[in-house]
Amino acid sequence: MTKERLEKYGLNGYKIPSHVAVIMDGNGRWAKKRFWNRLKGHAEGEKRVDEIVRFSREIGVRYLTLYAFSSENWSRPRDEVDGLMSLLAQSVKKRRDLLLDNNIRLNFIGDLGNVPEKIREAALALSEETSSQSYEMTLTVALGYGSRDEILKAVKEIALQVKKGYLEVEDIDSQVMKKHLYTHDIPDPDLLLRTSGEIRISNYLLWQIAYSELYFTDVLWPDFKKENFVDAIKEYSNRERRFGKTTEQIRS
Ligand code: FPP
C-alpha cells in the first residue's frame, strides 16, 4: 500500500482493518425523505457500493463483506424484491470490469436458492471468473443471508458427521465450526459498520463478529461517502482490540 494513497485521505499512520463488514441500511428512508419510491433509494445505494469497493481496494482493505439482501428481505413487497433482484443483475453486469481490472474476487454467502435462476447463474459465473484470477481483495455479497440459518446449517452438517462416525464430539471446536460456515475461506471481520442510525446486528455474521469492533453512524447508506468511511477507519484505529486479554498482555 503506497504511503501516498493513505496520505491522500489523511489515513497515514492509522491501522487499516483487513476485513470490513457493512450493513448498508437507510435506502428506504433516503428515498422517503425525497418523496421517491424505495427502489430509487436502493438504486442510489447500489452506486455507493461502487465507490466504497473502489475506495476499500485503494487503501488496502483485503475483505469487504456487504449485506445486500437478508433471508428476511424475501418477505418485502413483491415489487421491491423484484426491483432489488434486477438491481443485482445490473450490478453484476456493470461491475465486471471493475472487479477484473482491480483484481477483486467476488464471493457470495447465503442461500441463493430463491434468487431467480438467470440472475443467480450470472452472479455465480462472475464469481468463478474473478476467483480464477490472482486477487488482492475479496468482495463478499451476503444474499439471502441469515446468520441463524447459517449456524443451524453448520450444526446439522457437523451432527451428521458425528452420526456417521467421521467426527468425535470432543473434536468439535471453533475451527470445525468455521469449516461449515459460508465464511469458511475468509477471516472474521475486524470492523462491522452499520449506517442509518439503527444500533443492531440484524442476524448478520453473528458467529464471525465475536471480537469485531462495531461502528454505527447516522448517515443513510445512499449518503455514505469515502469521507464517512475514513471516519469509521480512524475510530477503529483508535480503539484497542484486546480479545479478552489485558492491555499489558496485548502490549507486551
Ligand atoms: C436496507 O435499506 C438495504 C437493503 C435491504 C438493500 C441493500 C441494497 C443495496 C445497497 C443495493 C445493492 C443491492 C444489490 C442486491 C446489488 P432499507 O430498505 O431497509 O432502508 P430503510 O430502513 O430506510 O427502509
Image (tube, helix red, strand yellow):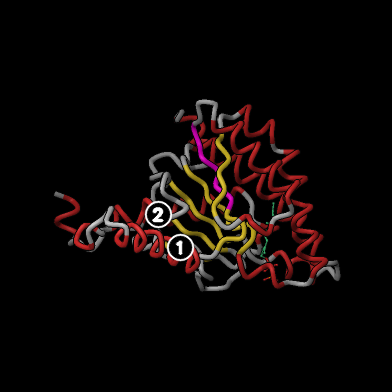
SS under mark 1: helix
Q: CA distance from mark 2 to mark 1?
A: 8 Å
Residue 242 visible here: no
Q: Main secondary structure of the magenta part?
A: strand
Q: Say the numbered circle drawn on residue 201.
A: none
Residue 206 quadrant: bottom left
> 187 or 19: nearer the eye?
187
Residue 130, percent from left and from top: 59, 32
Q: Are marks 2 and 1 in contact (CB under 8 Å)?
A: yes
Q: Which residue is mark 1?
A: 153
Residue 18, percent from left and from top: 42, 44
Q: Could you tell me which residue is drawn at 36 percent across and 54 percent down?
A: 178
Q: Which residue is mark 2?
A: 180
* Span of residues in magenta: 136-141
Q: Could you tell me which residue is drawn at 70 percent across and 72 percent down?
A: 75
Vertically, is 8 above or below 228? Answer: above
Q: Judge whether residue 67 is colored magenta.
A: no
Other-residue count near label 2 (Cα within 10 Å), few / some / many at <14 / 14–19 / ≥20:
some
